[in-house]
Amino acid sequence: MKKRELIQAVAIHTDVDNKTAAKLVEGTIDVILATVAKGDVVNISGFAKFAKIKRPARIGRNPATGEQIKIAAKTVAKVTALKGFKDIALGKAPAPKINTKRPAAPAPAKKAAAKPAAKKAVKKAAPKKAAPKKAAKKGAKKK
């Protein structure tokens, strides 16, 4: 599912227009990104935990030669799926039901004295004549 499809699904499920759903989804993503960039952890219970982790410098080994190498300290992004998400993804718990169809819009009220039916012009479509088929014969080549 792409971002556009996610926005459409959220709009249908929450019964809001696509523009509002787009603002909500993009706003949620922006808040998560800004908070994690600051160094704080975002924990959406039952879904996922987003964090910025600092890894210290360490000594590692080159697998080809076996010699020791220094691995520099670095900062990484870490996303951890939580128990609720894992249970649903692995089929241990039922997935939540979502709306897949928009509710039907109410029909506009008809005006009683709009126009009399007698004034409506009814156009009859003239029957179309079949176009004559041209007999396309390829002539023999002239010498």
Image (spheres, helix red, strand yellow):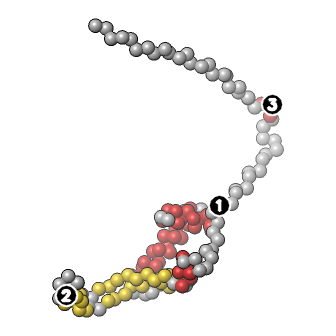
User: What residue do we see at 20% from left, 82% from top?
Assistant: 64
Q: Where is 21 relative to 72, above or below?
A: above
Density class for disc 1 (Cα within 10 Å; few <14, some 14-19, many ≥20) is few
Q: What residue is pinned by disc 1?
A: 101
Amino acid type at circle 3 is Ala
Task: Examine the rendering and report whether any part of residue 112 can be seen.
Answer: yes
Q: Where is 94 relative to 21, above or below?
A: below
Q: What residue is pinned by disc 2?
A: 66
Of residue 111 and residue 138, the one placed in the foreground of this image is 138
**Does label 3 or label 2 sit earlier along the sequence?**
2
Q: Position of residue 100 (x, y in %)?
A: 63, 63
Of residue 20 and residue 87, the one placed in the foreground of this image is 87
Amino acid type at circle 2 is Gly
Q: What residue is pinned by disc 3?
A: 118
Q: Which tag is nearer the camera, tag 2 or tag 1? A: 2
Q: Position of residue 4 (x, y in %)?
A: 50, 62
Q: Position of residue 128 (x, y in %)?
A: 63, 22
Of residue 46 and residue 14, the one placed in the foreground of this image is 46
Cβ atoms at labels 2 and 1 below 8 Å apart:
no
Spatial distance from mark 3 to mark 2, Cα to Cα?
96 Å
Spatial distance from mark 1 to mark 3, Cα to Cα?
40 Å
Of residue 50 and residue 87, the one placed in the foreground of this image is 87
**Does label 1 or label 3 sit earlier along the sequence?**
1
Amino acid type at circle 1 is Lys
